[in-house]
Amino acid sequence: MDMRERLIESTRELLWERGYVGTSPRAIQERSGAGQGSMYHHFRGKPDLALAAITRSAEDLRARAEAELSGGGTPLERVVTYLRRERDALRGCPVGRLTQDPDVMADPALRRPVEETFSWLRGRLAGVLAQAQAGGELAAAPDPAATATALVAVLQGGYVLARAAADAEVYAQAIDGALGLLVPAAPPRSR
Amino acid sequence: MDMRERLIESTRELLWERGYVGTSPRAIQERSGAGQGSMYHHFRGKPDLALAAITRSAEDLRARAEAELSGGGTPLERVVTYLRRERDALRGCPVGRLTQDPDVMADPALRRPVEETFSWLRGRLAGVLAQAQAGGELAAAPDPAATATALVAVLQGGYVLARAAADAEVYAQAIDGALGLLVPAAPPRSR
DNA sequence: GTCTATACTTGGATAGAC
DNA sequence: GTCTATCCAAGTATAGAC
């Protein structure tokens, strides 16, 4: 992995762990093993580096979700697969996290990937939910768009609650609760 | 309002807007109108000030929730009242926000009010949901604790999505989606 | 491309006068 | 209780040598 790549990856980790304000160029240099000059050779400064890192995280999230939502099984099965995917609950979401960073949200360039990621995700999930309704797997009543937004919110909020409790099980409980409402006959998670 | 109180309130606002790392003693002094000496007279430093502010925010959240969850109406009505309460969606939750702050979560004293607040809220809501089930307002099937956690997660995640979209309506959509699953016959929000 | 030196600002706090 | 002066580390960069 070349230096540029290492810088991006280190920045991704630090943004995830500590957010934008909490991430200093120094810390990035230490974690990546790059020197001062090297970092400023590859990137113009912290915002430039952050843009590369955020873009990368956003692409990542989208690629995984797309793989599961367009994967095998019935529409409802794919939704469940997506929701139940193993996640590092205590680390939280590398993209959702950024919404709490005022400096990120204040910069249109940094903000854009965050906005687009969730806008896409909500829409994509709503589409699969609509398919599930069309196929009779789900009741026809609830609005797919609202349901999709609620489900994505459960994921994001599940991270918050798991971190508050310092317990990844709380995240799993949030997902269980949501699935219990979405699929009344759903088998409970094995414990 | 005396100076001590102004310092606490200013710190609360700043923690809410910018988080712990993003909040400097200088900024607190400017917002509160206190001088250097005044601030360090009333508080021993940033962590001490943050503790006072966080405790205050936690008490606030709890008091409001308790008022609604123990207020008038049937159990299910009280849950709906709580979920539909007017909230400043783009500002987010002053307590939930702190879970993203590594320095807060790393300090047991600062972390405690956050942990206790959500632990209490999930339990309290679960209790009211159980009442609603006992009274026949809700289906008996879903586990009240899991459902409660999912609903609180929708709130917290709704803030995340609303901020990502820079649109408070997204928050409302998340709540609508959750209520649509919880109460299949619920009347849609008036628009 | 990477290193070292340098620079200026801000963060976070202490000391002592009033 | 509040003010001013002072302090040292860290944040964020630029300049120029290698």
Image (tube, coloured by chain):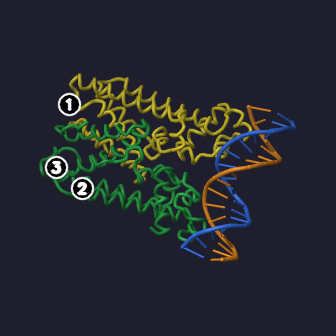
Chain colours: A yellow, B green, C orange, D blue
State yes or no: discs 2 and 3 in contact (Cβ < 8 Å).
no
Instruction: Give whichever of A81, B147 is nearer the camera.
Output: B147
User: Which chain does tag 3 point to?
Assistant: B
* Residue under numbered circle 3: B133
Marking on residue A141: 1
- Cβ atoms under marks 1 and 2 closer than 8 Å: no
Rounded to the nearest angstrom, the CA distance separating label 1 from label 3 is 22 Å
Taking the spot 19% from the left edge, 49% from the top edge, the residue there is: B77
User: Badge 1 local density, few (<14 within 10 Å), some, or many (20+)?
Assistant: few
Q: Is disc 1 placed on a helix, strand or loop?
A: loop
Name the foreground residue: C16 vs B79: C16
Vertical position of residue B15 compared to residue A147: above or below: below
Q: Quadrant of the C terminus of chain A?
A: top left
In the rendering, at what x and y percent does residue B111 appear?
A: 45, 59
Dot 1 amino acid type = Ala
x and y percentages locating residue B36 in the rendered image:
60, 65
Residue B126 screen position, x and y as percent: 25, 53
Q: CA distance from mark 1 to mark 2?
A: 28 Å
Q: Which residue is mark 2?
A: B69
